[in-house]
Amino acid sequence: HYELYPHEQHVEKEILVKLKQILVHANAESVLSDTSLVPFDPGELQRMLDLVSNIQGSPSIQSPTSACALQDPAFTSHHVMHTQFLNFCGQVGARLDADKSVYSKEVATKQPISVFLGLLDFALFGAPAAHLRGAQRIWVDKTINGSRWKKYISGLNNEWGGFTIYSTVMLAVDISFLSVPGVDTANLYSQSGPTLAIYASIITSTSALIVSVLLAAKIRGNEVDSVEGGARYMESMTRSVFGMEGLAVMFSLPYALLIWG
């Protein structure tokens, strides 16, 4: 209510003290736990804590005209309460880790994969299963933790960016080999085994480069790096024919193609 109607409102000091205590606990949890429920990174939490501390020490906080001073802690409290609601805070079955479900005792990352993914996982050097487990730890109960999602997307972008560099280097090496006199012949049927292997490496390296660029462009184009865009993207992918396994295979293609090259 204070967030939408900050004018002519008064805030009790006890509310700011409680909000500050929550932020201090959240800051410590985000630093000490790998499965923290806090949807903000430590830097954001520290800025929120500084903001609440400045407002708490401001003499104009009790003034009816301090609408902006009231709106900021109200906005922070809204996000804190929403996070507590999603994680069933205070209930018997409350979520204690970000990768655990509140509706099932089964751990998604320990569920067996399908035969289809098992065959592809063998052909793609185990990358699909690894990406599947990573996505299952992020997409829990059809919700996304903001801080964990940003780290996940940042890791994918860095991984694909590295693959584009490796693919470019592989292409340069392969083409330099073909430029050696006597390696490549005009007759297609008289090509040697190493020459055919170089051609196969060129195809797979080029494919890895193209797929990496397309995946990175898809992430940026659909605003998947944001929490709202990420939730929409994960929801659409899990409703597809192949579901989460199809997403895992798609994300693993750059790595697998580069290894094959």
Image (cartoon, rainbow, N blue to C red):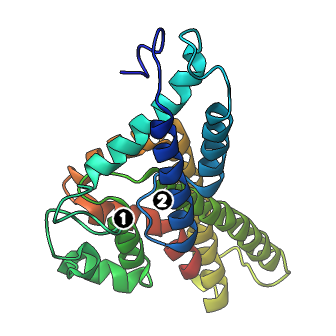
Mark 2 and mark 1 in contact (Cβ < 8 Å)?
yes
Q: Is residue 142 above or below residue 52?
A: below
Which quarter of the rendered picture does the C terminus lie within?
bottom right
Please name whichever residue, 54 or 4, is drawn nearer the observer in this view of the structure. Answer: 54
Residue type pointed to by label 2: Arg
Please name whichever residue, 75 or 113, is drawn nearer the observer in this view of the structure. Answer: 75
- Percent from the top left, x then y, of residue 40? 52, 51
- Percent from the top left, x then y, of residue 131? 41, 71
Q: Is residue 176 above or below residue 24?
A: below
Residue located beneath label 2 in the image:
148
Which quarter of the rendered picture does the N terminus lie within?
top left
Residue drawn at (35%, 74%) of the image: 133
Horizontally, is 171 left or right of 142 in the view? right
Residue drawn at (52%, 23%) of the image: 71
Residue drawn at (76%, 84%) of the image: 183
Residue drawn at (41%, 70%) of the image: 134
How many numbered tags mark residues here? 2
Please name whichever residue, 20 or 171, is drawn nearer the observer in this view of the structure. Answer: 20
Residue located beneath label 1 in the image:
98
| Extreme residue toward the right, this view | 181
Which of pointers 1 and 2 lies earlier in the amino acid sequence? 1
